[in-house]
């Protein structure tokens, strides 16, 4: 339950900190507490949790948990962007290209819109093209070369996912996921609690539909999302 999750979060477990922050932000199973959400997002983000970095950036930029702090939001978006989050790349580009700090950094905005566009973000591509007119051709060529060579840093799996038992394990958690995947139309195999290739394909189809990174297995975050999507 939530108490066990809080104990894990308070013990420093990043995935638990992320999930608890989401609960506090969205009043899920607990009363809404944006100060607590900020605190737990920050704890997880400082450990390197990608989703916590992004969510914290959104919360700070929104001003929902106090005065909007776009400078701090930009720092977290930048860190998440460097780890490959397309949404963070887009948001960081927005903050860089708009006159949020007195002087707009069009080159940095162009760079991150272009990086997000290279991953298939059509909105980012449109924004990139709008900024292109304000950047000298020589500088734009240099930026394009940097974008072409850019690669994200790999997130630390130790603080970004919670592996469940081995692929051959039979357990109630996998069974719950299979039943949810069936309900959502992403899995047609047996609900037998075995994390086989068919179940993994269903998890990946669900993750793609949700705009989530391609999973290597069933994680606590993915299970929580499945549960949310199938709750009456």
Image (cartoon, grey):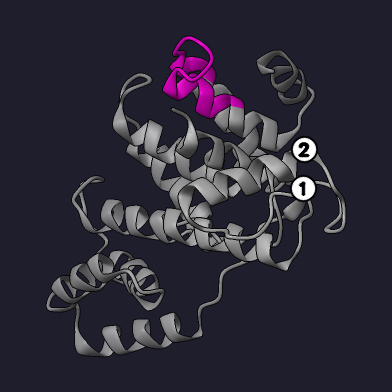
Q: Nearer the viewer, residue 182 or 96?
A: 182
**Residue found 56% across the figure and 31% down from its top:** 41
26 in the magenta segment: yes
Give the quarter of the figure containing the N terminus: top right
| Left or right of residue 114: residue 192 | right
Is residue 76 shown above or below 41?
A: below
* Numbered disc 2: secondary structure: helix
In the displayed orientation, state which residue is furthest to the top. 31
Q: Are marks 1 and 2 in contact (CB under 8 Å)?
A: yes
Q: Nearer the viewer, residue 6 or 88?
A: 6
79 in the magenta segment: no
**Residue found 76% across the figure and 49% down from its top:** 192
| Left or right of residue 10: residue 34 | left
**Residue found 23% across the figure and 59% down from its top:** 97
Q: Of the numbered discs in the image, which one, if any, rests on residue 126?
A: none
Q: Position of residue 211 (x, y in %)?
A: 44, 57
Q: Position of residue 130 (x, y in %)?
A: 14, 72
- Disc 1 residue crowd, few under 14, some 14–19, many 20+, Cα 10 Å: many
Query: Which region of the structure is painted magenta?
Result: 20-36
The total of numbered circles placed on residues is 2
Q: CA distance from mark 1 to mark 2?
A: 6 Å
Q: Quadrant of residue 9?
A: top right
| Left or right of residue 71: residue 18 | right
Would you name the residue on which mark 1 appears?
Answer: 193
Would you name the residue on which mark 2 appears?
Answer: 172
Is residue 181 shown above or below 176?
A: below
Q: Earlier in the sequence, mark 1 or mark 2?
A: 2
* Numbered disc 1: secondary structure: loop
Give the quarter of the figure containing the C terminus: top left
Q: Position of residue 96 (x, y in %)?
A: 29, 56
Q: Position of residue 122 (x, y in %)?
A: 26, 71
Q: Quadrant of residue 27?
A: top left
């Amino acid at each position: 339950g939530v108490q066990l999750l809080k104990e894990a979060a308070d013990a420093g477990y990043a995935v638990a900190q992320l999930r608890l922050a989401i609960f506090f932000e969205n009043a899920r199973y607990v009363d809404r507490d944006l100060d607590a959400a900020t605190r737990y997002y920050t704890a997880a983000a400082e450990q390197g949790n990608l989703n916590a970095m992004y969510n914290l950036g959104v919360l700070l930029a929104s001003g929902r948990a106090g005065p909007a702090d776009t400078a701090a939001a930009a720092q977290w978006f930048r860190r998440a962007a460097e780890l490959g989050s397309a949404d963070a790349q887009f948001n960081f580009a927005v903050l860089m290209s708009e006159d949020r700090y007195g002087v707009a950094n069009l080159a940095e905005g162009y760079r991150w819109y272009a990086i997000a566009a290279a991953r298939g973000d059509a909105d980012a591509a449109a924004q990139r093209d709008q900024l292109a007119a304000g950047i000298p051709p020589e500088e734009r060529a240099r930026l394009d070369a940097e974008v072409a060579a850019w690669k994200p840093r790999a997130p630390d799996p130790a603080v970004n996912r919670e592996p469940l038992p081995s692929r051959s394990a039979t357990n109630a958690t996998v069974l719950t996921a299979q039943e949810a995947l069936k309900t959502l139309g992403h899995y047609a195999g047996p609900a037998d609690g075995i994390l086989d290739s068919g179940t993994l394909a269903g998890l990946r189809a669900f993750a793609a539909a949700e705009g989530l990174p391609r999973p290597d297995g069933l994680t606590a975050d993915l299970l929580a999302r499945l549960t949310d999507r199938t709750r009456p």
